[in-house]
Image (cartoon, rainbow, N blue to C red):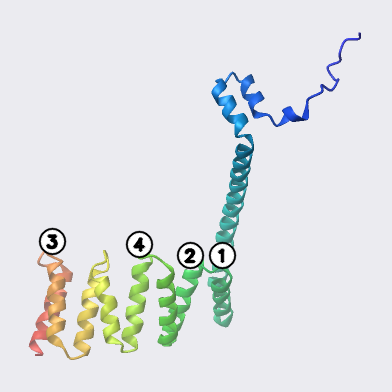
Amino acid sequence: MADRSVFDKIHVDERDKADLGGVLEQLNLPPVVVDFVRDNQRTIFIVLGVISITVVVWALYGSYVDKRIADSSAALAIAQKAEGDDKIAALQGVIENYSGTASSSWAKIELARHYTDKAEYSSALQYYKDVRQSIKDTNPVYPLVLYGIAQTEESLANYDAALQEYSVLKTTDGFESIGYTSAARIYEVMGNNDSAVKELEQYLGTLLGDAPESPEKLYVNEKISRLKGAQ
């Protein structure tokens, strides 16, 4: 009989091709493991298939998200460089085409600023409120959005609503001064100097670590004296 060539095809029983147990036997695994695999081979194949599909789908979704974020950032950058009506249309396009992204939120903020500059405060307020609904209060942009809402509410003479926003800013790091002094300003406009003084005195309480001659303390004390003198 002629020697077998290394290129000759070795016959393999089709039933053995999918026999995980046989593979495991070759790996010298314990018999109990081999028996378990043989008994549950169909289930194992199904689980492995589901896992493979899940991994592939997740990877594709991750690529889609990354691409969408990149595309939205590029669209926002182009919109910010535009002028006039073209800029407004481009920003609205970012909002419509990339809803849920950070770029969409920034586009709304840009439009809010635009309408504020044009004294169209109702439109500005709506955009600011839309952003607040779409971001978490832990987002670094959140206090800036609250400030925008408070300012537009104040410009619309919605003083109670503005005071509510400023009250949140009083407890927000870096925005305490804005919260207290803005609330005091509103009370003064409303003719309620007692409440204005109270706001400023509370603000002074947050500046206990500052030197008595600090510009901020001198300003607040001067403001308090003026308001008390007007009573």
Which residue is under mark 3? 209
| Circle 3: element type | loop
| Circle 1: element type | helix
The crowd level at tag 4 (other Cα within 10 Å; few <14, some 14-19, many 20+) is few
Type of residue at label 4?
A: Thr
The crowd level at tag 3 (other Cα within 10 Å; few <14, some 14-19, many 20+) is few
Please tell me in which quadrant of the rendered image residue 92 appears: bottom right
Q: How far apart are labels 1 and 3 at the CA level? A: 45 Å
The percent position of residue 8, horizontal first and vertical second, equals 86, 20
Which residue corresponds to the image point at 16% horizontal and 88% vertical from the top-left?
Answer: 192
Pointer 2 with pointer 4, Cβ within 8 A: no
Type of residue at label 1?
A: Ser
The residue positioned farthest toward the right in the image shown = 1
Q: Between label 3 and label 2, give the one nearer the viewer.
A: 2
Which residue is under mark 1? 72
* Earlier-in-chain disc, 3 versus 4: 4
